[in-house]
Image: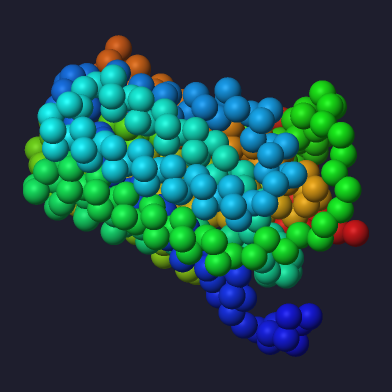
Amino acid sequence: MNTAGIPDRAGPLSYRPYAYFWYSRLAATLAMQIQVVAVGWQIYELTGSALDLGLVGLVQFAPSVLLLFVVGPIVDRGNRRTILALCRLSNAIATLALAVASINGWLTREGLFAFVFVLGAARAFEMPAGQALLPTLVPLTMLPRAIALASSAIQAATIVGPAIGGFLYVAGPHVVYASAAAMYLVGAVTMLWVQDRREPGSLPQVSVRYLFAGIGFIRRHPILLGAISLDMVAVLLGGATALLPIYARDILMTGPWGLGLLRSAPGVGALVMALWLSRRPPQRRVGRALLGSVALFGVATLVFGVSRSLPLSLCALVVLGAADMVSVVIRMSLVQLETPDAMRGRVGAVNSVFIGASNQIGEFESGAVAAWLGVVASVVIGGVGTLLVVALWARLFPELARRDRLAAPP
């Protein structure tokens, strides 16, 4: 038995605060994945531009940079549960407004970009708050399993959400957005049942040093810097999700339903891997496992880039998602286990910028290169670049390559 009276062999969901956190994350991620199909399809229908598809990611990423030195202190000094609930409530309101604009024919390219910016602002707070709150909900010895299980909620929604969004789009984009708004609201209400059980203490005075502490902490820890930057650069080069509407319509010759399947495929691989890691988290040679998983991500990207077959493309995306999940669990476990609770908000804000750079700027990079060199060339170049980055990072960060266990030895 542990201090909470729960058998040590029990899973993370045996802890009620964590269970509510998991259900809230599932609902909010399902909402996001439902709406992403409608946003991508509407942007491409309105403009027919690969560059505009890439701009969606850039607009969503911008608030993370603009609010970097605001988010961290607020998360470290405020109630993280309340922050998450407010983020999901704001997403519900914004998505409902998008449904009204769609049904009345008011929606424009600029309106969609404004909506994406609002979502990005909420996400700038949501990611660090969630990362900082999670380690307080379960014993630290169970943290890798909890991270993997929390990631399984994201991946389950990633599988189901795009498929639901693709089928709902047949009834109109306003139906997609209204459904997403309802799920965001469920996530906001469920989050209010989570207890933020941090020990109260004196808060340091906000200063320039306090604001920059997250950056300094990561810079002084080469294992964290290597793990975070590896994910950022590799996914920035290898990410091809922004181009899925083009692959679905112009290369694989399918429709919105096919786009939904393509968006769901990485989640299938990631969910299977997350469930496996929630039972058997990485124990030894975690540095090599991290580098190997990113290399496999690059290989899967290459296969997807050259494929002209829908089944082969789906298989490549499944492998890509599984490899990415190994990287996510190892990286997030290292960040949380190496960071004191009082600094998790500021470190999480910096980590969120790295994640946003890899995902949102990666989408912009893919769109820009696709507009310049072509869609297939963009994805192939990204896959090759990912493999080169893995080889380079193994030399630049030897401490990361040699890391054996997730928890540092005393």
* Residue 58 percent coordinates (x, y): 43, 24
Picture residue at 42% right of the left edge, 36% below the top: 119
- Image quarter hosting the C terminus: bottom right
Picture residue at 50% right of the left edge, 45% below the top: 87
Picture residue at 33% right of the left edge, 24% below the top: 113
Q: Is residue 210 above or below residue 144?
A: above
Residue situated furthest top in the rendering: 372
Q: Is residue 271 left or right of residue 78?
A: left
Q: Is residue 154 left or right of residue 5?
A: left
* Residue 109 percent coordinates (x, y): 24, 21
Q: Is residue 364 left or right of residue 314?
A: right
Asked whether the viewer can see residue 227, the reply is no
Q: Is residue 239 above or below residue 369?
A: below
Q: Is residue 354 above or below residue 377?
A: below
Image quadrant in which you'd find residue 56: top left
Asked whether the viewer can see residue 407, the reply is yes
